[in-house]
Amino acid sequence: MPDFATGQPGITELWLHYLWKEKKFSLVPLRADNNLNLEIITPGWYNRGWGPDFKDGRILIGDDELFGDIEIHIDEDAWDKHGHNLDDAYNRVVLHVYLNKANYEVRNKLGQPLPSLDLNRPGFSEFWKKHIPPTKISIKELPGVCGLYLGQTNYQKVRNIIFQASEQRLLSKSESFAGHFSSSSLTELENQLFASICRSTGYSAFSNDFYKIAHLYPYSELRKFFRKTHRECKSEILSRWFGYLGILGIYRPEEIASDLRREWSAMKQLWQQNTHSHNSIAVQVKTPSRPLNNPVRRLTGLYYHLEKIHFQGLLKSWLKFLQDCGKLLNSKQRGFANIQKLLDKLFPQPDWDPLNYLISPNSKAVKTQANRLIGKQRQFIILVNAILPFFLSWARHHHDKSLEKTLFALFLALPGEGRNSKTNFMEQRLINLHPNFKIKKNLSYYQGLIQLHDDCCRNFYEGCRNCSLIKMIRQRKI
C-alpha cells in the first residue's frame, strides 16, 4: 500500500464514514472494481445500529443507477470476517467501499457478487494528502457543549429526551426483525431468534463468530440431535461449534483438564468425521479481560439452554417466559429478583460439569467456587439485545397489544446495565457538570445515553457544532 495510507494510522472506519457522508470522495474521479465510472448521487442515511453503514443510498455505475445500502470497511476481507456474507440484513447492499485491497470477491448471502470501490486505487494519492484526519480534535477533548446548555430548568426535558431515546433504541433493534415476519415460516423465525441469541451470547470478541455458527448450524437442524442420549447430543452439537471455530485444534490432548479429556477427544473425533470439517476457521482465543467469557464456557452454557427448552422450542419457551414476566409485573412481585429467577431457569447448568470450576479447557487451576457458564449479566444482555427486540417485532406483527405492553414494562423495570465508553462519554459531557441532576439509572437510562451518543455525537471530526441534542434542549416542548 502506498505510504500516504499506511503512514496515517488515524484513518479509521469512522473517518471513512465521515468522508462518505459529506460526499468528499466525489472530489476524485471514481471507478468501480469493474473499471466503470462511479458517481455518488446520494450517500444514504447514516446508520449506527445493526446493519449496513448507510441506508438507502443512490449511486451510478456506468449507465446503471443503483438504490440500496452502502457498507464501508478498512479491509476488503472484513466483509466475511464480520459475517455479512451470512446476514440477510446485508442483501440490500449495492456497494462495498474499502481502503485495503485483499484480492477478494465480496458476495452477499444470496451469492450475488457486489460492486466495490477501492479507496486506494491510482488517483487517490493527492486526495489522502488533503484529507488526513485532524489530529487537533480528540474525543477526550470535545467540549461537551450540551452540558453547558443543561440548566436546572431543562432537567425534566433532558429526562424526557433520554427516555424517548431509549424507546427509539428498542424500536430500532426490533426493526431489524420486522422484514422476516411477513415472509418467513415459524421455523425460519425460530432460526432468526437463535442467531440473535448466539450473537448476544458471544462476548464482543466472538459475537460475529457465534452469529456465523447460528447460520451454519441453524436451530431447526440442531433440534434433531436431542432425540439422542444426552452425551451423544452434547458431543454432536459442541463438536460442530468448537470444530468450526477451530478450538478443537488449539490444545494438545495432554493440555486438556483431566475431567474434560475423554469428552474433548470424542468431540475431536466427531468433528473429523463431519462433512463441514473443512469449513473451520481459526478464531483467536486469547485471554480476555474477563476470563469467564472464554468461548468454550459460553457455548457450553448455550447448549444447556437449548437442552432446557428443546421440548417446547425457542419461540414457545421465550413467549412463556414473557407471559410469566407480565404476571409478575402486574402483581406485587415486581422486583427484578423474581424475573432473574425465571431467567436462571432458562439457563441451567448441571453441578457435575467440570467447566463450572475451570476458566478454560486447559486450566491448571481449579476454582473452589462454581461460576455460571452464562451468568446474570450475560443473560441480561441476551434479554435486552435479542429477546425484547425480536418479540416486540412479533407483537406488532400479530397485533398483540398485551405482549407489547409487557415488553415495554419489562424494559422499564430492568436494572441498569454495565457502563461502557459511550455512556461514560455522555455522563462526563452532559450530566456530571450538574450534581443536582437526578435520574433513575436503570436500563432505559443507559440505553437512552447510548442512542443519544449514536445519534448526536457521531460527527466526531466536527466537534459539537450543529449538535442536534443542543437543538432539542433549546426547544420549548419535548
Image (tube, rainbow, N blue to C red):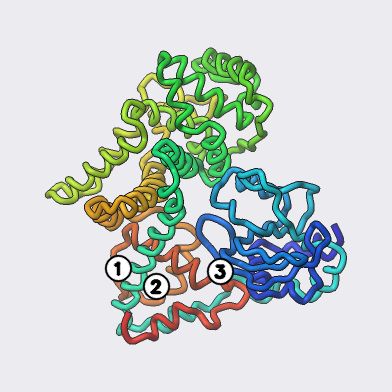
Q: CA distance from mark 3 to mark 1?
A: 32 Å
Farthest front residue? 63
Q: Hey, which quadrant is residue 313 in on the image? A: top left
* In this picture, residue 399 sits left or right of residue 20: left
Q: Nearer the viewer, mark 3 or mark 1?
A: 3
Identity of the residue drawn at 51% across and 36% down: 214
Question: In the image, what residue type sits under mark 3?
Answer: Trp
Quarter of the figure with the N terminus: bottom right
Q: Which residue is mark 2?
A: 431
In the image, residue 142 above or below residue 49: below
SS class, disc 2: helix
Label pair 2/1, CB-CB below 8 angstroms: yes
Label 2 neighbourhood size at 10 Å, few (<14), some (14-19), many (20+)?
A: many
Question: In the image, what residue type sits under mark 2?
Answer: Ile
Taking depth in this image into account, of 297 and 34 the one nearest to the observer is 34
Question: In the image, what residue type sits under mark 1?
Answer: Ile
Q: Which residue is mark 1?
A: 439
Taking depth in this image into account, of 422 and 432 the one nearest to the observer is 422
Of the image marks 2 and 1, the number of the one nearer the N terminus: 2
Q: Which residue is mark 3?
A: 45
* In this picture, residue 448 sits left or right of residue 340: right
